[in-house]
Amino acid sequence: MITYNFKLYSAKKNKHLNKKINLAGAIYNHLIALHRRYYRMFNKGISVTRIQLHITKLKKTKRYAFWNNLGSQAIQDIAQRIDRAYKLFFNNIKRGVRTSPPSFKKLRRYHSFTLKQAGYKILEGNGIVIMGRKYKYFKSREINGKVKVLTIKRDMLGDLWIYIVTEEEVQPKEARSGKSVGLDFGLKTFLTTSDGEKIESPMFMREASVKIKRQSRRLSKKKRGSKNRKKARLNLARTHRKIANQRKDFHFKLALDLTRRYVSIFVEDLNMKAMQRLWGRKISDLGHAQFLNTLNWQMYKNGCQGTKINRFYPSSKTCSACSHILAELPLSVRAWTCPECGAIHDRDINAAINIQRVGASTLKGEDVRPDSSGCLC
């Protein structure tokens, strides 16, 4: 499955799609209320099948006849989405994970609806028909494969995007011979390679922090419901979108460069949630998890292979020259001398070398797949 993402042209007719997204949000809130009422009455959840049968009856009534403007498939998808969210919520409770159940959403914060088999048609060129109306989009590349799902999404700036999921078999490049590398992720440096190269952290959020604070302060001073408040909110959302695009561009370029230079790539299995609790916004700004997803996909396309080593392996405390393991190594210590062989180590480079060594010894030689258990995501 391949997903294509395109932006729709700005046009007056886009108001029809905005109305349908708002309608989808109203239906979502109605189904959430129905789930809660059923649970209060019977102390158990309601199945998605019963919800869908109830929706069919509601649409035949005069009060809810306007639901037919959205389309049956989009409404069914909303019911299925809520059902998956509740199943995840109850599974998390059984596992002792703190989480919250699905909740109501403001209509302006509800962003999308999905059509699976009908209600749309891809035209030649850059045209698309959605529920009987023709729209145009910025077609940056050709769409290959059979279209299976179409999602219309509205971002915080009010721009509309289409996500087209196609059934297409991507043929990865044949495995090639070449160098292997270990990657050690950090805070001051985004990552360090076993070759001694250090990639500095761009920190896009921190660089724009002054601008974000100024725009947030202006937004807080505007009167609620006024046009000036809307303008201030859009300016803030525009800044955040620019930061996200910069981070994504950095990740793609770095992942492509690594997969072109190296054949085997090894990383450490990071505990992102624990890192998030310790360092908060800084980890979110770096986007290590997002980068690993991008790297995994680029490895698959470019015929690379790799694996993740155990997160509890003491890569920083192990001497890469004699394998001596230190008892303690505080995070503030960035360089240390091995008491056994006297080798002087840079903490990050030493960890990357150990990651590369352990990864190479455990690699089975299988191609990395985006959905495999051994991928770097």
Image: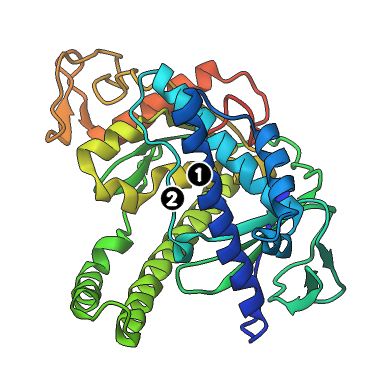
State which quadrant residue 80 falls in: top right
| Residue drawn where x is 38% and y is 77% of the image | 234
The number of callouts visible is 2
**Residue 297: x and y, percent?**
61, 44
Query: Tag 2: Cα neighbours inside 10 Å, few (<14), some, or many (≥20)?
Result: some
Q: Residues within 10 Å of mark 1 (few under 14, many from 20)?
A: many
- Residue 69 image offset from top left, x and y in percent: 72, 65
Tell me the CA gap for discs 1 and 2.
7 Å
- The color scheme shown is rainbow
Q: Are marks 1 and 2 in contact (CB under 8 Å)?
A: yes
- In the image, residue 199 sits, relative to residue 86, either above or below, namely below
Q: Is residue 119 left or right of residue 104?
A: right
Task: Please indicate, yes or no, whether residue 315 appears anywhere in the rendered image.
Answer: yes
Q: Is residue 163 left or right of residue 82?
A: right
The residue that disc 2 covers is 104
Pick whichever, 364 or 250, lies toward us. Answer: 250
Q: Position of residue 72 (x, y in %)?
A: 75, 53
Q: Is residue 41 above or below residue 120?
A: above
Please give the residue where the numbered disc 1 appears in the rendered image.
32
Q: Is residue 68 above or below residue 263?
A: below
Q: Identify the element where label 2 is drawn.
A: loop
Which residue is painted at 56% across and 41% down in the image?
82
